[in-house]
Image: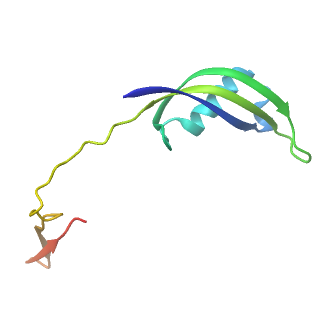
Amino acid sequence: MFFLSLIEHTLRLPPHLLDLSLDKTIQGELESQFLDKVIADLGLCISVYDIRSIDGDFAFPADGASTYTIRFQVQSVSYSPVPVEQPKESKPFAPMVILVSSSFELHPFKVFHL
């Protein structure tokens, strides 16, 4: 399912980005930090949907970067767990036999998936 979630994040913008448009710079930084990342309790973030507010523009002492508090929406996708019923007598995994060639001789190995 797709979800829209509101997130509040404190974003530090380095000085070399301050000469660009603030909205586009913040959008780009948020996308680099959140897109294609899995966010706990939300799922996979697929887009920064809407920037609601930009507050702050303060700098910490001895730091040339501006810091903003940003509220924005992300669109995420989350898959609900699929219940899998398994008979009680079945094994938790099934062994496989893989043949590996070493010096032109075949040696069987059993590989178990855990």
The one of 55 and 64 positioned closer to us in this rendering: 55
The one of 92 and 56 positioned closer to us in this rendering: 92
Q: Quadrant of residue 50?
A: top right
The one of 97 and 73 positioned closer to us in this rendering: 73
5 sits to left or right of 90: right
Q: Quadrant of residue 33?
A: top right
Q: Vertical placement of 41 versus 5: above or below? A: below
The one of 100 and 53 positioned closer to us in this rendering: 53
76 sits to left or right of 20: left
Query: Measuring 70% from the left and 29% from the top, which residue is drawn there?
Result: 70
Query: Measuring 33% from the left and 38% from the top, which residue is drawn there?
Result: 80
Residue 24 on image: x %, y %: 67, 22
82 sits to left or right of 38: left
Let me know if residue 20 appears in the view: no
Q: Vertical placement of 50 versus 101: above or below? A: above
Query: Measuring 17% from the left and 70% from the top, which residue is drawn there?
Result: 111
Quadrant in which the C terminus appears: bottom left
Residue 87 on image: x %, y %: 10, 56
Residue at the far right in the pictured view: 61
Residue at the far front in the pictured view: 88
Q: Vertical placement of 106 versus 4: above or below? A: below
Residue 72 on image: x %, y %: 62, 26
Q: Quadrant of residue 106?
A: bottom left
Residue 74 on image: x %, y %: 54, 28
Quadrant in which the N terminus appears: top left
Q: State the count of labels.
A: 0
Let me know if residue 16 appears in the view: yes
Query: Measuring 16% from the left and 49% from the top, which residue is drawn there?
Result: 85
